[in-house]
Image (cartoon, grey):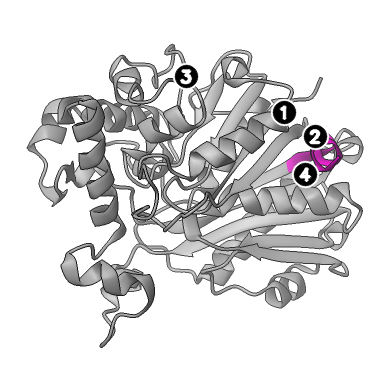
Amino acid sequence: MSAQLVKDRTAIAGIGQTEFAKSLDRSEKRLALEAIALAIDDAGIEPADVDGLASYTLETTEEVDIARNLGLGDITFFSQVGYGGGAGCGVVGHAAMAVATGQCNVAVAWRSRKRGAAASRPWSQVPDRVSGQHQWTRPFGLLRPVDEIAVLARRYFHEFGGTREQLATVAVQVREHANRNPGAMMHAKPLTVEQYMDARWISEPLCLFDNCLESDGAGALVITTTERARELRRDPVLIHSFAQSIPQQHQTMTNYFNDDPLLGPSWACAARLWANADVTPDDVDVAQLYDAFSPLIPLSLEGYGFVGRGEGLAFCADGNLALGGKLPTNTSGGGMSEAYVHGFNLIVEAARQVRGESPNQVDDVDVSLVTSGEGVPTSALLLVRDR
């Protein structure tokens, strides 16, 4: 019943996105307000029409400030989703459920992020004593997320084979998309396999180009009923399926307690996503796969059922992420080459593809997949063209 309440009954009616840069001269709150205002204008509604809010934790903006500064209506639904990059699709899914169940009529989902400065990153703030689960990993060298993903990458190479040259093709194909996107931070910076192989290590076997950007910027979406969206300014993008997951015995990033650490949260999330949908992986025309680090793309390809276990890296190396490939992926440049705002720009790009407005537009998109962080409690969305 819950799947039927959401399936195609709600739609993205407006999108908004600020510019992205290493350092912007506005606060996280100001960037959030700008992106939301752009999304409201894109939808052709009034700020007072908005009565629902959904956002991430780990953000300095508060709902009362957003509502007051933008002149929103009475807010009858608000929520936040945790776990950083795993939250993005969950934020949109929560807003869709609130609209579908009548808790609100028009919701806004957003993410604003100020992380360009090195001092803003959590791992740069070294406490006197490490507590919680990190006390069992930090003293032994797993200081940053990249160190944790490097361990999973090494395990993947050990279990299934694969080479750094193959992994290089992930970064190179995504960068090619960014080179055609004027809004991408890496728009004018081509990348070759040779440059990748010569790059400095960040956490072996991962080099500089296996990492996402650290960016300032914000994105936002307006979500309302499909019926209302059809009456507004832009063609609606239907929210067809939504899922979240925390798999059994999960530990964020490292997955130490699982029998198989490479079976990350995408597997449980995918099972619910496809069960809630009328489509299958074979129907997906374009994908936006969370890419804080390049190994997450082949892992997600496997988790969401596009290829078998151990086949994700070879699928990428065969050129299938590029335009004209079997599954054009991260067509705005993604977190590694457009900007990294905890994956919200991936959701904006997924909607653009359905609307036919991407700088790397795939022909005749009917089904667009977007995923949130692999390695942490996660979420995913299937967006479809209005039929």
The nearer-to-camera label among 3 and 2 is 2
Q: Are marks 3 and 2 in contact (CB under 8 Å)?
A: no
Sequence order check: which comes first, mark 3 or mark 1? 1
Estimate the x, y position of residue 308 in percent, counting from the top left.
42, 21
Q: Give the residue number, with chain letter if any, for mark 4.
A: 43
Q: Are marks 2 and 4 in contact (CB under 8 Å)?
A: no
Which secondary structure, mark 4? helix
The nearer-to-camera label among 2 and 4 is 2
Estimate the x, y position of residue 73 in percent, counting from the top left.
87, 67
Q: Give the residue number, with chain letter if any, for mark 3.
A: 327
For label 2, the crowd category at 10 Å Cα-Cα, with few meaning under 14, some 14 to 19 and many 20 or more, is many
**Residue placed at 71% from the left, 26% from the top?**
384
Q: Vertically, is 219 above or below 71?
A: above
Sequence order check: which comes first, mark 1 or mark 4? 4
Q: Vertically, is 283 above or below 152?
A: above
Q: Are marks 1 and 4 in contact (CB under 8 Å)?
A: no
Q: Which label was assigned to residue 25?
A: none
Kind of residue sitting beneath label 3: Leu
Kind of residue sitting beneath label 2: Lys
The nearer-to-camera label among 1 and 4 is 1
**Residue placed at 28% from the left, 33% from the top?**
171
Q: Which residues are magenta?
A: 1-13
Kind of residue sitting beneath label 1: Ala
Sequence order check: which comes first, mark 3 or mark 2? 2
Distance Cα–Cα, label 3 vs label 1: 19 Å
